[in-house]
Image: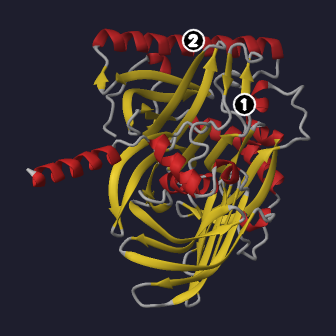
Amino acid sequence: MKTIATLSLAVLLTLTAAAQSPSKVLKQAEKALGGQKALLAVRTVKSSGTIRRVSDGVSGKYLFQTSQPNLLNIAYDLDGFEVEYGSNGRSGWTRNSRDGLQTLTGEASIEFQAMAAFRSGLWLNAKKEKAKLVSGGSANVNGKPANVVTMITAKGIPIKMFFDAATGLPVREEMPDAGQTRVTDYSDYRSVSGTMQPFAIRFTAGGESLDVAVSDVTVNRPAERADFDFPVVSGEPLPDIKALLEELRANEDRVEELLDSYSYTQKSIKRELGKDGILREIGSETYQLSFYKGNRIRRLVEKNGRPLNAKEQADEDKEAAKRVEEIEREIAKSDSRMGKQGSNGAPSEESRRISTAEVLRASKLINPRRERFRGRDVIVFDFEPDPAFDFKNAKSMLKFFGKTAGVMWIDEKDKQVARLEAVLADSFKIGGGVLAKLRKGASFTLEQERVNNEIWLPSQADINLSVRVLLVKGIDVNQLIRSYDYRRFETEVKDATVNPTPKQ
């Protein structure tokens, strides 16, 4: 009976530990690290020391820097082989002695940006950034019991945190990193400027472990912004960015003509971050797209994985035919107003492709650099809102893009955009805020592919935003848009014929 009672008590204690709420675990951790007030006051952290590869003992120098809200730089060398990662708040990059400098894109970019934000702010801004905190129960880390909390970012990146059950201090983190899990272990905590900082760190990923012995840590020492920006590694002169954008704008007439001869399939996937922190698909729509005199024509051909029935498809085809007739009327009306000059089939304001040069008029262009993207030479630069721009008299489209910050890749030879990443740096009001308000932090990513060696066309777009509609309802949008099966389109759109939807 005594044995049974002992076992029952052990099970009860285990269940109690596992049932601790994330808020309770994190409050204990904040207290152990110096208190929430002290942690919120931390703006920068810089640590240095030595790093050693466990497998062969090769070692070198190590440097770590972070600055609020999401600046990060990690640099080290192993027997002369240099590795460096950085986030300048708009984009992430990596550099090493073998592959040179590269901007992080796709999932790697999202994962690294999540890590940069976490390194500078921990979990303290989780609610503000719409991240979810989920209890992970208990675990054993290096022979000691630990409480587990997983933070899932708004973009679905899980950060698993382990806290010593006795002290409350963070002892481990697990984060996704390029298809694998990066494990970071912390120990040897010491007090620095009222906060507890780890002086022993182990990184493990892909079967390789690196040990860091920290020798110096400083908190809230002013950081140089240049420490987080892209290193200058190429001696080849860069083109004038504004002149390049003008060339890109001038080239868009030719691009519009090419678009008229293409059709493709586009699948829009709606996703939702559940209470359990898992990002799930909740619906999808598949369209067949083509361009007519610079205007985009869309036909719905599939919904939630199910093709439309004959009646539904016929209705969609009629709508597409009506749209073409509307375009013809708009062009005729414009030609009539412009007399002999004619409008040359100019697309309508709401459906035409917006000029990149026009969009960036309200932005400051910084950090230009040369890189390779999809086997092509590209010019990459960051952009951010220009405080000197006259927003009061600008068009709504310029007002919106003038509030974004991000990075753009331009094919230097083709004079076309290859990739774009943007984040809304400030809230954007529609109708003075009465109709809707797009909240700060909304992010947009567009990646394109080169088709038929002549034109860059969308391959994937990732949209993540939160909007308040009519001052009442808040809506979160998490959408992935995939475009594929590009082909020459020879049949007139007004015929409203629908090709069978190809497999993705």
Mark seen at residue 325: 2
Q: Secondary structure at mark 2?
A: helix
Residue in the foreground of this view, choosing between 429 and 70: 70
| Mark 2 vs mark 1, CA separation in Å | 37 Å
Furthest toward the left, the residue is: 1
Sooner in the amino-acid sequence: mark 2 or mark 1: 2
Q: What residue do we see at 70% from left, 38% from top?
A: 253
Q: Residues within 10 Å of mark 1 (few under 14, many from 20)?
A: some
169 relative position to 191: left or right: left
Residue 177's x, y, as percent?
A: 45, 60
Kindly report which numbered mark, 2 or 1, lies closer to the viewer in this rendering.
1
In the picture shown, does residue 245 fall above or below 47? Answer: above
484 relative position to 6: left or right: right
Q: What residue do we see at 72% from left, 31% from top?
A: 427
Image quadrant of residue 163? bottom left
Amino acid under disc 1? Ser
Residue 107's x, y, as percent?
A: 48, 52
